[in-house]
Amino acid sequence: MESNNILKVAAIQADILWENVQGNLGKFSRMLDTLSPDIDLVVLPEMFTTGFSMNPERLAEGMDGSTVAWFKQQAKQRGIALTGSFIAQENGRYYNRLVFVEPSGTLHIYDKRHLFRMGEEHNHYSAGAQQLVVNYRGWRIRPLICYDLRFPVWSRSRNDYDLLIYVANWPDSRRDVWTTLLKARAIENQACLVGVNRVGSDGMGLTYAGDSVLMNAKGQPLAASITRNDEVLIAEFSMTDLQAFRSKFPAWHDADDFSIA
């Protein structure tokens, strides 16, 4: 994979049409049309084709379904990497599954580890068990999903990634938690970070404020949402700046050793 000192990332914050897969694929296609051709990576919200639905029996797709086909087509056509999560079905189980598709068509998957108990997600979906690091354009990228944000052990860096991504449907009522923990994860892991949340309201009556942000490893925003509307945020991450900071302040050398059961 070609190395790239600068990684230009677009985060698409949007109001998701409730349980309307084709409508959302069309909407996000139109939002992708607004991007400049120099974007390297585009990040979409959690369950971007349906909203945070507990109806996987009606909405789940296989890996040969329309959503994965759309990911591959968009990535190839636009020459970008594209990531976000959708409702997947595999071997009789349902997953809140993130896919990361490269322009070549290479596909990586991450199944949400921490299922949101308070929304009964654990009663409808199976939890993932494997972390993911994608090597893309010389950047090591770890994507995670929404409720994973509350569990720092799962995201803990051992100097094994450079960019941390959270895709979410994070309700307005807990927006302070979202913004606080995103900043903490960037700082404690000395990693660049992208947090993409939806806006609007869903079929369960929950509202979402967005608060999407792209920040550097010091927790300083490079681009941040200022509206509760559909919005595209763009920032450039510098590997030179990241490595200089880690070299000057190598806190990761003193991290505690641990293993995840």
Image (spheres, rainbow, N blue to C red):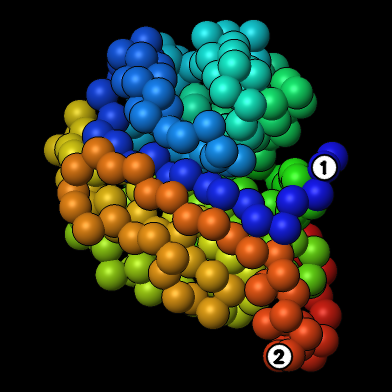
Q: Is residue 141 left or right of residue 31?
A: right
Mark 1 neighbour density, 10 Å: few (under 14) some (14–19) many (20 or more): few
Where's the C terminus, which quadrant? Answer: bottom right
Give the structural element (helix, strand or loop) at label 2. loop
Query: In the structure shown, which secondary structural element does the residue marked by tag 1 occupy?
Result: loop
Quarter of the image with the N terminus in it: top right
Q: Using the rendered image of the protein, determine whether residue 62 is visible from the camera's viewpoint.
A: no
Residue 177 placement (x, y as % from top left): 34, 69
In this view, 146 is above or below 87: below
Between 111 and 217, the one lying in front of the other is: 217
Q: Residue at x 55, y 39 (%)?
A: 39
Reading the image, the residue beneath label 1 is: 2
| Mark-to-mark CA distance, 2 and 1 | 28 Å
Q: Which mark is residue 115?
A: none
Q: Name the residue type under label 2.
A: Phe
Q: Is residue 159 visible?
A: yes
Residue at the spot x=31%, y=14% of the render?
23
Task: Tell me the kind of residue under disc 1.
Answer: Glu
Q: Nearer the viewer, residue 157 or 240?
A: 240
Q: Is residue 67 left or right of residue 239?
A: left
| Residue identifier under label 2 | 249
| Residue found 80% across the figure and 64% down from its top | 160
Instruction: Answer few, some or many: residues within 10 Å of disc 2's Cα (few below 14, many 20 plus, some between 14 and 19).
Output: few
Question: Which residue appears farthest toward the front when viewing the image?
Answer: 37
Residue 183 vs 38, above or below: the answer is below
Q: Dividing the picture into quarters, in which one does residue 54 lie?
A: top left
Q: Position of residue 148 (x, y in %)?
A: 53, 56
Give coordinates of residue 34: x percent, y percent: 37, 29
Above or below, comparing residue 70 to residue 180 in the picture = above
Indicate which label's residue lies in the foreground, 2 or 1. 1
Q: Which residue is rendered at x = 28% and y = 30% of the image?
A: 16
